[in-house]
Image (cartoon, grey):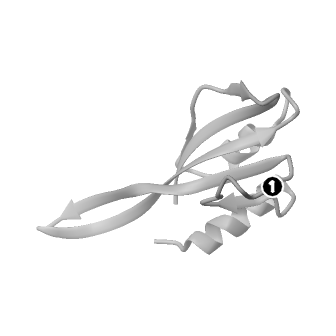
């Protein structure tokens, strides 16, 4: 199981900036384009009556002013186990939710 800090650095690399936030409280002023993510659970595989592999599940969202952003495509091509949900607009910002196993 890879560490969350390694995931954080990879997300920063994909985004091309340090605007990546983990468990962001509402009081934090984010800069856009940004990625916000949080731990959502664990995917546990069993074998031979014990835990064989544990993978962390993260829920995140790409937030941008650009409706034609390529950031979701870059995340999909960078991470092997990733899927995107339905995009939406809130506060005049485009949101692209995703689930990532890392």
Q: Regarding mark 1 in the picture, which secondary structure is present there?
A: loop
Task: Indicate whether 80 appears above or below 1.
Answer: above
Q: Nearer the viewer, residue 71 or 93?
A: 93
Quadrant containing the N terminus in the rendered view: bottom left
Image-based side of 67 in relation to 89, left or right: right
Seen at 78% across and 30% down, the residue is 91
Name the residue carrying label 1.
29
Graded by Cα atoms within 10 Å as few (under 14), some (14 to 19) or many (20 or more), the crowding at tag 1 reads few
Task: Indicate whether 79 appears above or below 64.
Answer: below
Where in the figure is residue 75, as x and y percent of width and height? 70, 47
Question: How many numbered discs, if any?
Answer: 1
Q: Nearer the viewer, residue 28 or 42?
A: 28
Where in the figure is residue 52, as x and y percent of width and height? 27, 68
Seen at 19% across and 64% down, the residue is 47
Give the image quarter of residue 38: bottom right
Image-based side of 49 in relation to 4, left or right: left
Where in the figure is residue 23, as x and y percent of width and height? 60, 60
Furthest toward the front, the residue is 27
Q: Nearer the viewer, residue 24 or 48?
A: 24
Seen at 65% across and 43% down, the residue is 61
Give the image quarter of residue 88: top right
Seen at 72% across and 39% down, the residue is 72
Image-based side of 51 in relation to 101, left or right: left
Task: Indicate whether 83 appears above or below 32.
Answer: above
Image-based side of 95 in relation to 67, left or right: left
């Amino acid at each position: 199981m890879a560490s969350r800090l390694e995931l954080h650095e990879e997300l920063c690399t994909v985004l091309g900036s340090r605007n990546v936030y983990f468990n962001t409280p509402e009081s934090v002023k984010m800069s856009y384009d940004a990625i916000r993510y949080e731990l959502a659970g664990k995917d546990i595989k069993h074998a031979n009556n014990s835990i064989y592999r544990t993978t962390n599940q993260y829920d995140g969202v790409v937030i941008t002013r650009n409706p034609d952003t390529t950031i979701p495509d870059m995340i999909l091509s960078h991470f092997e186990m990733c899927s995107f949900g339905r995009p939406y607009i809130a506060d005049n910002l485009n949101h692209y939710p995703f689930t990532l196993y890392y």
